[in-house]
Image (tube, helix red, strand yellow):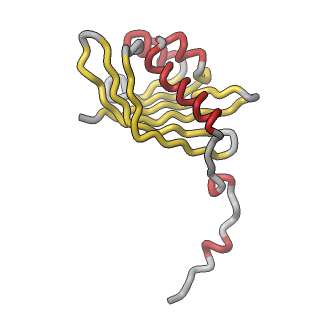
Amino acid sequence: MTVSTATERRPAHAAHKSGTLSPHEQGILWDMEEHFWTSGAENARATTATNAVMVFPYPPGILQGDQIWTHLRERTGWRTVVMAERRVTRCRDIAILTYRVSAEKPDVPIYKALCASTYLNDDDRWLRISHQQTAVN
């Protein structure tokens, strides 16, 4: 059997040096993510970068910048949210949270989705730069 030397010669790019966050930092990000769902559009806006991108099941689809807040004003404020299968990946100043969500609010069927949020640590402040949801049954 021959072992490829391509792997050995691959440059040590930052993307190959992924890691994790301290338990404290993870707690901060998971709290931010839960409040993204439960605390209304203004809270979500305060923790999201100005030109962030979000992908929601169609409609509305792909939104960026101010388009996000028009959509979220009508679709935030979930009463309860459960995030399962939580995972965190970090590469330098970027952290990606992935999870399965089950969210509930009055007069709306329970919403279930697979989600990913990407955060950037900008001057010691975490900001969401993207969020994606894929609805599941």
In this view, which residue lies farthest toward the front?
A: 23
In this rendered view, identify the residue nearer to me: 8 or 70: 8
| Quadrant in the picture for the C terminus | top left
In this view, which residue lies farthest toward the right?
A: 123
Q: Which residue is painted at 59% across and 24% down in the image? A: 51
Against 127, is 70 above or below? Answer: above
Q: Which residue is painted at 46% across and 36% down in the image? A: 116
Quadrant for residue 99, please give it. Answer: top left
Q: Which residue is painted at 42% across and 35% down in the image? A: 115
In this rendered view, identify the residue nearer to me: 65 or 88: 88
Residue 46 location (% of width, % of height): 60, 15
In this view, which residue lies farthest toward the bottom?
A: 1
Against 1, is 72 above or below? Answer: above
Residue 18 location (% of width, % of height): 62, 51
In this rendering, would 90 be left or right of 33? Answer: right
Q: Which residue is painted at 44% across and 33% down in the image? A: 132
Please give the count of numbered marks on the rendered protein.
0
Residue 68 location (% of width, % of height): 47, 19
Residue 1 location (% of width, % of height): 50, 89
